Structure formats: structure tokens, C-alpha cells
Amino acid sequence: MLLALARHAEEARLRWNAERAAVRARDETPARSEAYAYYVQANLCLIAAIGAADLPADFRISGITLSRDPVAAAEQLRQVVVAYDPSGSIEAAHEAARLAYKAAFAEPVTAQELQYVDLLAGLSAPRRDKVIDLAEERARHTEA
């Protein structure tokens, strides 16, 4: 049951990230959406199920010992499961917009930009999203 909930949570995360990427490809500002709400709800269900299960301290599943902290245990389970999106690629419908977006910025990457890429690649995904969101916010304010 926990693995099934973890799979749903991971699929929701992938769907939400794909939707955010599609919005960015269309040069629009990402906002909270139904996919985000589903992602949050799936994670809350997983965390609640882990907390309600009252697992022993040495409980193992898929070869890992789950943390006693439900949030940490949920993250461990999401890393173990293989997510599958039966609806197919969300990005396929937005491929033309993504290619147009990339073509608009087809200039070669400078050495300084390459350093930024390396810095961003070293950050965790949530932290990287936060930095990108802040950069987009500042870009909107300078354009206005």
C-alpha cells in the first residue's frame, strides 16, 4: 500500500514538473495548478499513511530501512518507486512552443552563463526551482 501511494506521489510530481516545463516553454509564468494541488494531496496522503502505519524502527521495504520521520520516509519511498504516466508525454502537445522558445535564444552560451549552469546543476531541484522563479520574477519587473 505504501509503495502504491509513493508511486502515485511520484507520478504526480512528474506530471506537475512536466506541466511547469510546458508553461515555461510557452514563455508564460508558472502558477499553481490542478497538477500542483494533486501533487500536494498525493504527498499528504503518503505521509499520513506512513504516520498511521506506526511502523517498527527497523521496518524494511524494497531493501531500505524507512526513517521514523514520516516526511523522510515518504522521500525514501518516492526514490524507490518507478513512476509511470499512462497518459503519455505532457510535453508532446507543447513541442512546437518549446522549439520556438529554444530558437529564440539560440546564441552560443558564454563562459559566464556556463558557470551559472554549473551552479544551478549543483542545487537540489526545489532550490533550483526557487532560484529560477526569483530570476523570472526579477525579469518581469525589469521589463515592465
Image (spheres, rainbow, N blue to C red):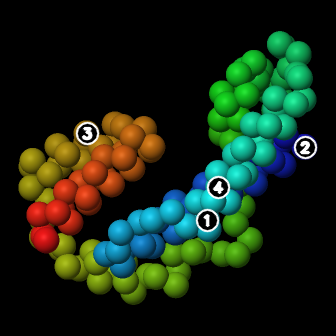
Residue behind mark 1 = 35
**Depth check, front residue: 49 or 62:** 49
* Residue at the image position 63 percent from the left and 59 percent from the top: 37
SS class, disc 3: helix
Residues at circles 4 and 3 in contact by the CB criterion of under 8 Å? no
SS class, disc 1: helix
First in sequence: mark 2 vs mark 1 = 2
**Which amino acid, mark 1?**
Ala
**Depth check, front residue: 73 or 51:** 51
In this orientation, does residue 76 appear? no
Residues at circles 1 and 4 in contact by the CB criterion of under 8 Å? yes
**Which amino acid, mark 3?**
Leu
Residues at circles 2 and 1 in contact by the CB criterion of under 8 Å? no
Within 10 Å of disc 1 (Cα), the crowding (few <14, some 14-19, many 20+) is some
Within 10 Å of disc 3 (Cα), the crowding (few <14, some 14-19, many 20+) is few
First in sequence: mark 1 vs mark 3 = 1
Q: CA distance from mark 2 to mark 4?
A: 18 Å
- Measured as percent of width and height from the top left, residue 18 is found at 52, 66
**Mark closer to the observer (2, 4):** 4
**Which amino acid, mark 2?**
Met
Residue behind mark 2 = 1
Residue 39's disc is: 4
Q: CA distance from mark 1 to mark 4?
A: 6 Å
* Residue at the image position 51 percent from the left and 75 percent from the top: 91
First in sequence: mark 2 vs mark 3 = 2
Residues at circles 2 and 4 in contact by the CB criterion of under 8 Å? no
Residue behind mark 3 = 119
**Mark closer to the observer (1, 3):** 1
**Which amino acid, mark 4?**
Tyr
In the rendered view, tell whether residue 16 sits above or below residue 9: below
